[in-house]
Amino acid sequence: MARVDLEITRRQFFGAGLAGAAAIGTGRGPLAMHYPDPPWFATGEVTTTYNYCDMCPWKCGIAVQSVDGKVIKVDGNANDPKSRGMLCGRGQAGVSFMYDPDRLQSPMIRTGERGEGKFREVSWEEALDYTAEKILAIKEKYGPESLAIFGHTTGDFWFTDYFAQAWGTPNAAKPSSSLCLSPRDEACSLTLGFPVGGHEPMDWDEIECVAFIGSHVGEDSRNTVMQDFVEARNRGAQIIVVDPRFSTAAAKADHWLPIKPGTDTALLLAWVNVLIEENLYDAAYIDEWASGFDELASHVKDFTPEWAASITELSADQIRATARVMGERHPKAAIMPGRHTTWYGNDSQRMRAVFLVNSLLGAYGRHGGMYFNKSPFLDSYPHPPFAVTGSSGGCSAEPGEEVSDELPLGPSGKARADGARETFLRGATAMQELIDPMITDDPYRIAGLMIYGVNLLNSVPMPSRTIEALKKLDFILAVDVLPQEHVAWADVVFPEATFLERYDELSTVPYKTPFIQMREPAVAPLYDTMPGWMMARELGLRVGLDAFFKWETIEEYLDTRLRSVGSSLEKMHDAGGVIIQEGKPYLEDFGDESPFLTASGKIELSVADLAEAGLDPIPVYEPTEEPPAGYYRLLYGRVPVHTFAKTQNTPVLSDVYQENELWINEDEASALGYGNGDRVWLENEAGDRTGPIKVKATQRIRKDAVFMAHGFGQQSEGLTNANGKGASDTKMMSRYKLDPISGGAGMRINFVRLVGGG
Amino acid sequence: MASAFLLDMSRCIGCEACVVACKAGNELPQGRQYIELIEQTSGTFPNLTGGFQNHRCYHCADATCVAVCPTGALFKEDGLTRLDRDACSGCGYCVQSCPYGVPKMSDGRSSKCDACASNVGGGGSPWCVTTCPGKALEYGDRDEILAEANSRVAALKDRYPKAQVYGETQAGGLGLILVLPDDPETLNIPADPPPTPDVANLWKNWVQPISMGSTAVTVVGLGVLGVMARKNHLAEMREIEENHKTTVSTGSAEGGHDDA
């Protein structure tokens, strides 16, 4: 604080006196007098539109208020089962995201070299015609499978699902699959016969114990989970948090297990051991609904808490105690499956162990355990048969999707190029596995790439390999709202209207009460931007896919779908933007049929399919490579006000948290000569560097790992707020380990050291 | 009737939804936020406790900022401390004198939470309250808020033996009633904020009313204030500033007087 000098004080004092004098005679009036600007809701007619938020993949229902063509305020939609009228910080910044002056404003065609970021602005006609010409040339030369399509966030449906399948490429992929959810959903499908399905179906209303393994409630800002977590905890539910870091959730936990990174499976097997040895599992439930119990029981016999303690660096007492806390509350206890589960390359097996614990607790289909979620009924818009069945998966995948043994073939007879069935067993298309084929032409050439909303260079590991691939492609289209780093590599740029400016596909949410969300524009698109559905349709009409885009307007498309549930856009709007249906959450809702969709109709504690594929039918603990001396394991996650790169440039959010910090154990930092706020560079074993990043020296993390928020350290001059801020976790990922079951990319096997600064 | 916020730190999950709702809803300029979440940690790995200081205006009944405000820009209404930024002269006395270190200068004028005065005037709750996913925030009649706080604390005793209500008496009674799981110091909140200095009350209760009476007396008031400002007031303020610097972390880089 600056010292107050007398001259300034005097000047202010006179200013103050004069203001005081001016107020004479007016007295204190009503509020309006003290707030001369009328509040926004008094400045014109307020229009409310309904939408689902696009600031993260969680898709909370929102109510958007606008006055005179300007969006003013976004709030949670009180009718929506997910937001219940509340919203996280990122959602609250939707308006700031929409009015971000850095937005892409016009279609562009590249003029400079790839990566230079030099473009000329063109008309939509020209941009669409040019794109159509380029992809038709690829189809002509190599077949439709040679066009890959990557998509992320709501709206990707039109590209990765609809256009891709109509066009005929099986190489459509989403980072939300193999860089996030795949191990979780494949492990769940192998065990129970269906994937977790987007939102973890914890029966929060009655749950008495929840365990989190590397799931960061609060820091990940998942609105519904935060609400449910706080409520359950307030009711007295026991909270167990397994995390190498004293996270926000750990600070709220009744039991915190500061586990050594990479050893979770050992802990889980020990929990299974205690549940069985101490007879704390639900024997009647297992008897009725599960197969393979005897194999499991003999498998875990030696996996005692003492055995796990030496591996996990936890105490055997704590392992035993937490198993009892869960077991004593069964079936009202479960481990939260989490979302981002691509950690160490053996992730499907770890997740299998999670589902084994939940099964022993008898949690599935039980009050206070985990309910069965169900997708809402809603007809598709009629269309001709697709040219290929897609498998992009991701957050929008619905539970109950069949995984067939044979991979679907594209029109020229080619299956996905990601190595599925050869290098990994099953699941959605693995995005990172499509990069090599772009470079090597093996198994065949991928010549074109459409990138919808994926922050390619800050999400796919080995970004230098990605750049090599981008250099080799014949054609690259980037569809985005912001000039993210990879956009500079595109041949054509389609600027998209944000979620607040467009209609979009209906969001069908598998839930306890399945529901449908709508997206309607609050205002017309700013600048020369276009909604994604319109781009996909315009492109479709130019490449001979007219039969798939018969609808003249999006309203007609949406009304047709809504008619199948007795509604329409207008009716849905009038009803508050949501259609809620009945679910079948509990075992008793299934009558004589089994809710488990495995071949046996039972929970498969031991999986024969895995044994047949030469994999472990029951999970075993496999050690993960240790960081070499002087290096730390790089862990990454979220801070509450950011999701991805696009939020990092959002003015309001950037202002609250502008650059990521490197969490490092305080004692380690001080031994290295670093203190809080020092700026350092990170260097991985391959010699790649990123930074500088601010040191956060804290007791809240183990000594063998460092942690930072994901997605920072972007290099794009067009991102005024985000460019060069902090360090990039992705740029430290010079390798990953492929999960042989799900095709997920285990990314927590990279090690960094701190360089410079001090 | 007095209104108040309830802030239940047993339910706050540090998600900063309130921070952004406030910042976006009140269109706060770059670099300014009325709510800050400041991580608090005690102990050494792995024996740790921690939480957040959800730092924001406490809406003191005996509000030092109101007492020292020479223009009446800061005033009490409905139990809350309001700010009419148009009437602010930018003197920065409030910034220096607040026992909690809350007001900050922004664009040359004081800025702080005014409980979304214009929004509540329209019939809603403050934006931080309506959006809070943990329902850690409530807003309403102060007596009812206090009763709710007391009943929550009673329910928390099993998990948190030291659970307590904060704000019933501090600074004459706060308009921000906290439910704390532990002693306030664990979240870097002073158990008892320093009281409003007598000299500030002298100004507020005697000098200012007289000076408001007529222009002639205002001139006299100016003289009195001039002497005060030079001799007593600043020394007092500096002392307060030093005191609260040691107890409260003020996160903003924005300084006080120089840009006024």
Image: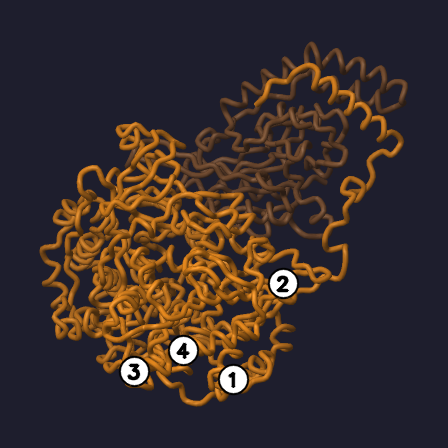
Chain colours: A orange, B brown
- Mark earlier in primary sequence (1, 4): 4
Spatial separation of the CA atoms under disc 2 and disc 3: 40 Å
Please state which amino acid type lies under the numbered disc 1: Phe
**Residue named by callout 4:** A164
Do the residues under discs 2 and 1 have CB atoms within 8 angstroms?
no
Local secondary structure at mark 3: loop
Please state which amino acid type lies under the numbered disc 4: Ala
Q: Chain of mark 4?
A: A
Q: Looking at this rendering, what residue extends furthest in the front direction?
A: A112
- Mark earlier in primary sequence (2, 1): 2
Residue B185 relative to residue A633: left or right: right
- Mark earlier in primary sequence (2, 4): 4
What is the quadrant of the N terminus of chain B in the image? top right
Please state which amino acid type lies under the numbered disc 2: Leu
Rendered location of residue A746, percent (x, y):
26, 57
Spatial separation of the CA atoms under disc 3 and disc 1: 23 Å
Query: Is disc 2 in the same subunit as disc 1?
Result: yes
Please state which amino acid type lies under the numbered disc 3: Pro
Image label count: 4
Q: Chain of mark 1?
A: A
**Residue named by callout 3:** A408
**Residue named by callout 1:** A549
**Residue named by callout 2:** A526
